[in-house]
Image (spheres, rainbow, N blue to C red):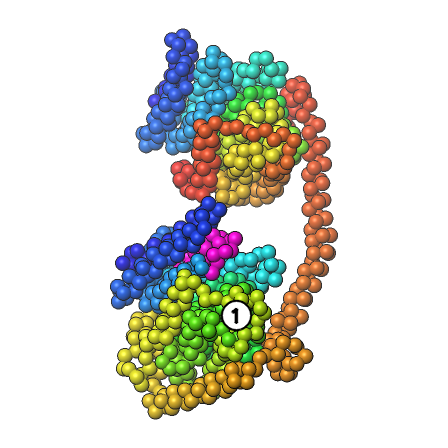
Amino acid sequence: MTQLVGLIPLFPLIGFLVIGLWQKKFPGIFSGILASVLVALSFIISAGIFFTLPTSPVTVDIFDWIVCGSFSAKMSFYIDPVSSVMLLIVTGVGLLIHIYSIGYMKNDEGFARFFSYMNLFVFFMLLLVLGSNYLVMYAGWEGVGLCSYLLIGFWFKNTEYNHAANKAFIVNRIGDLGFVLGIILMFLNFGSISFDQVFSSASHMPHNQPVMVTITLLLFVGAIAKSAQIPLYTWLPDAMAGPTPVSALIHAATMVTAGVYMIVRSNIIYSLAPFTLHIIAIIGLATALFSATIALAQTDIKKVLAYSTVSQLGYMFVALGVGAYSSALFHVTTHAFFKALLFLAAGSVIHAMSGEQDIRNMGGLRKKLPITFLVFGAGTLAISGVPPFSGFFSKDEILAKTYLQSPFMFIVLSITSVLTAIYMFRLFFLTFYGTFRGNREQEHHLHESPPVITIPLVILAILSTLGGFLGMPSILSSHHFFDTFLSPSIAPGTLAGSGEVSHTFEWTVVAVSVLVLAAVIIWLYSRYQTRGNVPPQEEASFTPAYRVLNHKYYIDEIYDTIIVKPLYGLGVVFWTLVDNRLVDGVVTGINKGVLYSSQMLRRVQTGNIGFYIFVMVFGIIALLIFNLVL
Amino acid sequence: MVTLIILAGLGLISLFSEIFSFRKILYPLILAGLAAAFVANITDWNTGGAIFNNMMHSDHFSVAFNGVLIATAFFWFLVSPGYFHDPTNRTDHFSLLLFSLTGATLLTSFSNMIMLFLGIEILSISLYVLAGSKKQDLASNEAALKYFLIGSFTTGFLLFGMALLYGASGSFNLEAISRFIANNQGQGNVLVYTGVILMMSALAFKVSATPFHFWAPDVYQGSPTVVTSFMSTVVKTAALAAFLRLFMYCFGTINGFWSGGIEIIAAASIIIGNLTAIFQDDFKRMIAYSGVSHAGYMLLAILAMNNSSASSLLYYSAGYSLSLLVAFSALLLVAKATGAETISAFNGLAKRNPLLAGITIIAMLSLAGIPPTAGFFGKYYIFSAALKSNYTGLVVLAVFGSLVGVLYYFRVIIVMFREGSDTRPVVASPGERIYLLLIAFLILFIGVWPGYLVSLL
């Protein structure tokens, strides 16, 4: 089965080429069906690999990619529990989102182009998770960045969207630079970039060696940008400009978790640099809390979900920072389910509302969109961590592992958890309860989405509900499937919770969290349903705190003032003085000189044979004098 | 040896086809014969050695270059037959071309000065006639006469140089001359040195390097386009192979003496060739001048005198020949539609025949040395060979020269996208389309996988 792994990325690549090259020729929704079938084929092989997984990691060589002196990078794939879980997420969730998109994008003129980009994205994402060395991973890493750019700016006629796409791309370049420097340093240090060799030579090194700390920090810079952590998170909310399925696939379920995957993959070298792990935990914690507060005051349905994604990614980084790699990957999995679900359900709402995204203009949709309402509810319960929905298990696990490391972080994370429930239920109640606040036309148009949209939603809702049972906490079951499954890929002794939390403590946490959640839900229900509270439309009626949160702490404006504007200023200086005057002057000068001498030289060609022969003889004499006399 | 016999025999058969009236099947016969010659040539790879009483020496160098020459000629025959409308003259032209090719193969495998002379003469005399083969055209006649006059003039230099070398060493055999030179290095033998300079000048004429290049623009422009195409590909490759073979393997021990001269010739060719090509309106004149600069680049391989000289020259000439074949075929088709052979005849080609425009772009990119075409790697290998032998200054000059080259090669590309007054479609027959696609594919193929050719030598 593992030998077939080469086919997994091949199918979407074929899809990209075929659909991309002949996009004008395919009738109707054919390209969408083709793209979905190809991803389905990849999913089937991924599932086959998952169920017949060999006990030790396997590397499958496809071809020699770059061989140059002592440097060699093979195009080869690495199959172990971690990559096989990611394979299932990428192809499985990817498949559902592809099917959903057939319905969602049906009337878009760029239908075929959309699916060619989507398949290209799946190809690069698979390259990223399958690569057996850092260079293949980097190729996938860059590729998904490219696809993200293409898809954010998918509706390229809108200038705003193009700006959002540029922002995502440019911010990611910063991270990519760190990533590539990390890879170079790794090659200089270990003489190799393949996982096997790096990990085996790293494992003999002492802890916190400066070079290891540098490598891990540089790689982490890449993860910060890709996974939208402080200070490089600002691109992700803007990335919501893309079509909703893109937000679900790329900016919630898969690409943004690439940073988490990369660190889980490199857990052996990260465990050797506890200093880096501390930094990761701090940044993750700050991001989780910070973006959760922003989400409290957003009114765009996708923006709330975007900040929630940033916040949940922060959770995962906290887990990584405390060394709970498998918990982080567990949360990646459950998050992929429920966040994809929430985005797609939001898409269904937007679809029904004729493109409206402001929750202040929604309300009371539960009667008109019963299926969407139910699945969105399941997603909300899951992300808020209500037992027994999947988010409860993965969050609970991260909380427990964090408590073992630092009670302070545990408290902050718990607060974040409560905030999550608040902004999610605020969103949920404002959208589905109360009375309808949109205009007449929208009300008239309200309808439940067709099955091609609702069926993927229902499947994702089931996964979000039950997915948590993959990793039951020890109070409920002695068998933690996820931990055991991943253990071959996680460095021994790095699993946090070498000391378990006591069962009494865990039960207390569960009980308290359920009570707090119940209180939050009741409070929000009365606030939005019973009293019909709606966030104010006018900026003047904002309370000061609400205004700050609504403006996202003015971070975009601050970045603009201290980084973007000075850079533009510098650009203007270089453009007018250095480029226009100096460089262009020199270039045109040379150009003029070349043209002038060309004009002069043409005149030598007279057409007169006598002259030609004279020059030849002259040349020979000159050569003879040059060589024999001088 | 078999290769040579097949090629000469093919030439004779072309002549006989008129008498025994089987000229209808002559064309396929020639293609088959060339294919057979190619195969026969390859089978010589490991069975080399002295042949014809040590007049010639078959080795990896000669087999590889013969392969490129025969393949180029084969492609030439694929794309050019339609040009000879008159069926009677056609057989004569074919036989002349085949004899010329025979001369070219002598130039890659000679081990005796006499064979070098014979090769050059067989190659050239056929071409003198071919250059004038458009009998009614004044320019064609002028080209033939000019080519002949200057060519015979330089043959004099060649013979004089050989005579001087014979006078010094008492032999025409390359090995004997090489031994003599090696044994008498310190004595500053004026006969040898003068002979070497004279032969250098004669060969520089054949490869059209400055200051012996003046014939090229006039002859290239005046000759029928297919003949120009043959001259600038097969003839140039053969002449450069002879140049390398003679100077590296025979005069190699005194390279300190002659390298200065070639340095000057190469530098002058790069400067003069590139600069004069800029303002040419006639496509063939532009190619002629740019051919001067390409000769300059290729001389760097001879200057380098190291183990990558031969392989880089082989690769460069293969890429250069393929690109020029495409360029000239495109010119033929464009000229057929518009009646002009100027660069502006390509106006709007992107609309008039997108496929042809695309293929021409590949050829132009290759000539300009843009990756991933063969032209880029050809330059890369030659420049890096020259750098290995510390010709940094010359390589810098060559790189600047290539930059100037972009100017006039891209002019052709730009013109293709300009809206012209002439919107008549440029027609290419299905066969021509397939052959041109095949050659364009080869340009890209050896550009992406240069190892197959470079590792030969």
On the picture, is B115 further left or further right than A552? left
B16 versus B57 height, above or below:
above
Query: Which residue does the image show at 38% across and 87% down from the upper left?
Result: A510
Tell me which chain the residue with mark 1 is part of: A
B217 versus A87 height, above or below:
above
Residue B10 appears at what percent x and percent y?
A: 39, 18
Instruction: Tell me, yes or no, if residue B438 can be seen here.
Output: yes
Residue A333 or A287: which is nearer the viewer? Answer: A333
A92 versus B302 height, above or below:
below
Residue B192 appears at what percent x and percent y?
A: 52, 26
Residue A13 forms part of the magenta stretch: no
The quadrant in which residue A492 appears is bottom left
Quadrant, the N terminus of chain A:
bottom left
Instruction: Tell me, yes or no, if residue A192 can be seen here.
Output: no
Quadrant, the C terminus of chain A:
top right
Residue A364 appears at what percent x and percent y?
A: 51, 75
Query: Which residue does the image show at 54% across and 69% down from the upper left?
Result: A443
A599 versus A540 height, above or below:
above
Determine which residue is flagged by label 1: A302
Residue B296 or A12: which is nearer the viewer? Answer: A12
Query: Which residue does the image show at 49% across and 41% down from the upper left?
Result: B373
Residue A398 or B311: which is nearer the viewer? Answer: A398
Picture mark count? 1
Q: What residue span does the magenta drawing correspond to?
A: A104-126
The quadrant in which residue B271 appears is top right
Residue B427 appears at what percent x and percent y?
A: 52, 28
